[in-house]
Amino acid sequence: MLLPLEDLYTDVIAKAQRGLGINDQELASQAGVDPQLLESVKSGSVDEDVLEKIAPVLKLHGPTLVVMARKTWRPHPLEINGLRQFNTTFDDMTVNAYLVWDTTTKAGAAFDSGADASDMADMARALGVRLEAVFLTHTHPDHVADIATLRKGKQPLYACEKEPWEGATLFAIGKEFTIGNLRIETRQTTGHSKGGTTYVIHGLARPIAIVGDALFASSMGGGAVSYADALKTNREAIFTLPENTVVCPGHGPMTTVGEERQHNPFYPEYKRAPHPVPSD
């Protein structure tokens, strides 16, 4: 299943404005664009000149913002033995959860539950995977709605100590876990939520980063707690990983660190210059 990108270019603009505390009047003035043109762009009318002018004010990368507006890029489809993504509907949106397992021992773990974890539980049984633990990236309702289905065997539930959850064993960031032959690092990616946690998993064909709502393909979670911290911890915890690391977000398609370095407008410093904009 090819999931659409979680955010449109208008969402990226809105998140950057909110995070930086820049209103429309200030943005139009600082970018030197007509306020009516800005309003039109924010309503979904693509004006590449306006996008290129407002991007630096919002500390975004202009060419990749234009690519988002043109809808000419999406991540390459990914399939890794030992990893499955599950996408379920929660209210008016969809949310992801993940099953990861050691392909040798069949020991596995769930990361978040999504709105309905029954498909994940069924898949684990069908594959002969022993679900040994459940890990939470954060505790927003869409990510924890069906934990009970995953814990019918009384599997331990783990959450960051900065974001407790009933029944969870709390850990300090930096703690590592072992599932079969897999090693799981915990890294702090706070900003969208107080205790946002990225789990970096070693032992499959490529490194895996379960990032929750810290990062999306071409975007990131809103900085509800701290926009500055969200940007900072993503840089420190995710963008320092090898480029072939598979990024498993809480919404939208899977991507890679390398793809996000080149296609995520929020991180202009990683772009290789020049960065051509596709013409088709």
Image: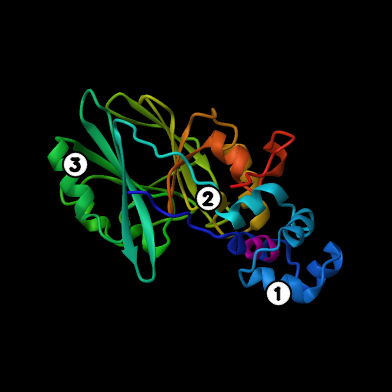
Residue in the image at 76% along x and 67% along y: 22
Q: In which quarter of the image is residue 11?
A: bottom right
Residue in the image at 36% along x and 53% along y: 96
Q: Which of marks 2 and 1 is nearer the N terminus?
A: 1
Q: Where is residue 113 in the image (x, y as percent from the top left)?
A: 31, 54
Read off the residue under disc 1.
39
In whole angstroms, how far apart are the C-alphas of marks 2 and 1? 28 Å
Mark 3: few, some, or many residues within 10 Å (few <14, many ≥20)? many
Q: Do the residues labelled 3 and 1 touch (CB within 8 Å)?
A: no
Q: Earlier in the sequence, mark 3 or mark 2?
A: 3
Secondary structure of the residue carrying tag 2 is loop
Mark 1: few, some, or many residues within 10 Å (few <14, many ≥20)? some
Query: What residue range appears in magenta?
Result: 13-17
Q: Where is residue 176 in the image (x, y as percent from the top left)?
A: 42, 32
Secondary structure of the residue carrying tag 1 is helix
Residue in the image at 42% along x and 56% along y: 164
In whole angstroms, how far apart are the C-alphas of marks 3 and 2? 26 Å
Instruction: Find residue 214 and name its label.
Output: 2
Which residue, as the protein is rendered here, is positioned at the far front? 280
Viewed as shown, does residue 98 lie left or right of 217?
left
Q: Are marks 2 and 1 in contact (CB under 8 Å)?
A: no
Instruction: Determine whether 90 is above or below 114 in the image.
Output: below
- Viewer can see residue 111: no
Mark whose residue sits in front, 2 or 1: 1
What secondary structure is the magenta-colored segment mainly?
A: helix
Q: Where is residue 72 in the image (x, y as percent from the top left)?
A: 55, 49
- Identify which residue, 39 or 219, lies in the foreground: 39
Q: Position of residue 191 (x, y in %)?
A: 59, 54
Mark 2: few, some, or many residues within 10 Å (few <14, many ≥20)? many
Read off the residue under disc 3.
124
Q: Earlier in the sequence, mark 3 or mark 1?
A: 1
Residue 109 sits inside the magenta stretch? no
